[in-house]
Amino acid sequence: MTGSASPESWNDAVLRTQHHPHFMQSLAWAQFKTGSGWEPSGQHLTNASGEEVLAVQEFTRHAFGLGNLIHAPRVSGITPEKVAVLTEHAKSLKGGKNLAYKIETYQQTDPELIAAYTSNGWVEAYPSQYQWSVTVDLTPDEDTMFASFGPKARNHLRFAMKAEIEVNRVPFSEENIVQLLGLVGGTKDRSGAFFRSEDYLRKAWGTFDEAGQARLYMAHHEGTLIAAAVVFTFGKKAWYKDGGSIRTQKRLPAPHLMQWTIMRDLKAEGFEAYDLGNVPDPENITAGAMEGLWHFKTGFNSNVDTYMPAFEYPLNSKQKLWNKYETKFLGLYSRLRKDYWY
């Protein structure tokens, strides 16, 4: 049912078998995670007839003395039929020190697909990735895209253009990275939002830049850097990955113009979709410190993506303990290591 992938063919296999696959399924993400405690493995899943069904990238890590968690993050192109193939693959991993097989499906919530997982013995699990996001369709012409934005977003863009804010794509030079990290740190302090460590960010940006799957944008006003953004790409899709900005006395809407510039560049290069990333629960947007992020991102598209729940397939009896107390384990790890386990 499975076989190890060769590095040269891996991205092609994922792009062929998954729909708009997430960058966490790319070879660059495997290279980035190597040495982090997670051991990557690319698997080619086939059906009973030996036909290719799915190329899925997994990461294995020992989970707090309970056994090995096998994690397949952000997998797309899943159908009820493919769940059956995934189940057979998970069953083949039973025994030894394996604890559970966890999959996070990068698709909008689908009752039929949820039913396929549960009927095949999978149980809902804690999601390690964000559950809601905003995606912009890049296939319409620019005028149609602009007209689809909310009125406030359009007004912000017009104001930013008149204010002569300059947005440019720039290289990942050491000087630019240091400036970017400064903006990220300032945004973290101001908003209370979670960001990974400087070493983590540097390695992620560097790995994807080397793979040709990263781009850095900076916005200046009258010679002062006021906003920056990192974008990752894979196949025909792109993601807003990291960024930051400063508050100016004139309240310049640089992030709006920066994102619109990114969208226009991506569209010109043939990309079809742009995931703006995490937004709060649509049913409770005032919880936490993310309400401003909600209004900013939904200004580009009012329709919010709600992703499938995470699922686990038990591989030994300790999976029930892991499933029940995983968040407590993760919380303890974060307090002790000042980092996120996943």
Image (tube, rainbow, N blue to C red):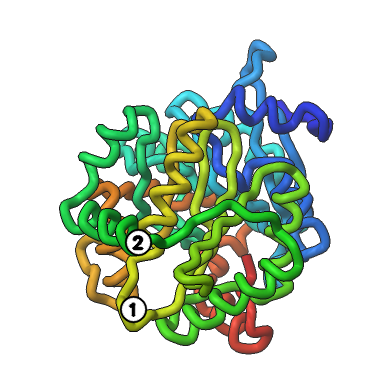
Give the vertical position of 263 relative to 242 (above or below): above
Asked whether the viewer can see residue 312, the reply is yes
Dot 2 crowding, Cα within 10 Å, few <14, some 14–19, many 20+: many
Dot 1 crowding, Cα within 10 Å, few <14, some 14–19, many 20+: some
**Label drawn at residue 289:** 1
**Label drawn at residue 174:** none
Say left or right for 18 vs 278.
Answer: right
> As shown in the figure, which amino acid type bears the numbered disc 2?
Val
Position of the C terminus, as image quadrant, is bottom right
**Residue at 49% across, 63% down:** 219
Label 1 element class: loop
Residues tagged 2 and 1 counted as in contact (Cβ below 8 A)? no
Give the vertical position of 316 relative to 326 (above or below): above
Say left or right for 297 vs 126.
Answer: left
Q: Name the residue under label 2.
A: 279
Image coords of residue 275 (percent x, y): 43, 47
- Residue situated furthest top in the rendering: 49
Position of the N terminus, as image quadrant, is top right
Label 2 element class: loop
Foreground of the two, 276 or 286: 276
Say left or right for 226 vs 94.
Answer: left
**Residue at 77% across, 27% down:** 9
Image coords of residue 153 (percent x, y): 24, 56
